[in-house]
Amino acid sequence: MKKYLNWQTKKNNSTGKIVFGTVLGLAAGFTAGMLTAPRSGRETRDILTAKTNETLEKVGGTIAENKEKVSAHGKEQVDKIADKLS
């Protein structure tokens, strides 16, 4: 049992290091990209804002579509169960 717990602890530590390294690498890449970008800061921020808003609209639309599908499917299942119980 002790061997298993030791392995699990090592696994958790390794996962944490991988996640930390990935986040650190992303931050360094983003910073380097912003510092060497050919656009001005204002222009870059405007582009990032537009892309963010575009992405949020797409995600919102997808969520609304899936909500409708799930609701319709749930209603169908309730109706089937009600028919079987009748």
Image (spheres, rainbow, N blue to C red):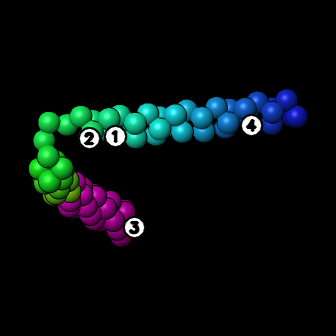
- Compute the Cα span from label 3 to label 4: 51 Å
Q: Which residue is mark 3?
A: 85
Q: Quadrant of residue 29?
A: top left
- Compute the Cα span from label 3 to label 1: 62 Å
Earlier residue among tags 2 and 4? 4
- Compute the Cα span from label 2 to label 3: 63 Å
Query: Could you say where residue 55 lies in the image, as x and y percent from the top left?
Result: 19, 51
Which residue is drawn at the image coordinates 27% and 39% (left, top)?
A: 35
Type of the residue with mark 1: Thr
Q: Residues within 10 Å of mark 2 (few under 14, many from 20)?
A: some
Q: Which residue is mark 1?
A: 31
Pick the quarter of the image with the N terminus.
top right
Q: Residues within 10 Å of mark 3 (few under 14, many from 20)?
A: few
**Does the image show residue 76?**
no
Query: Could you say where residue 15 lies in the image, as x and y percent from the top left?
Result: 60, 35
Q: Quadrant of residue 72?
A: bottom left
- Compute the Cα span from label 1 to label 4: 33 Å
Q: Which residue is mark 2?
A: 34
Q: Disc 1 vs disc 4: which is toward the camera?
A: 1
Q: Nearer the viewer, residue 46 or 84?
A: 46
Q: Nearer the viewer, residue 67 or 86?
A: 67
Q: Residues within 10 Å of mark 4 (few under 14, many from 20)?
A: few
Dominant SS type (magenta): helix
- Compute the Cα span from label 2 to label 4: 38 Å
Q: Disc 3 vs disc 1: which is toward the camera?
A: 1
- Compute the Cα span from label 1 to label 2: 5 Å
Q: Disc 3 vs disc 4: which is toward the camera?
A: 4
Answer whether residue 29 is magenta in the image. Answer: no
Type of the residue with mark 3: Leu
- Write down the region rendered in magenta: 59-86
Which residue is drawn at the image coordinates 67% and 36% (left, top)?
A: 13
Contact (CB < 8 A) between labels 1 and 2? yes
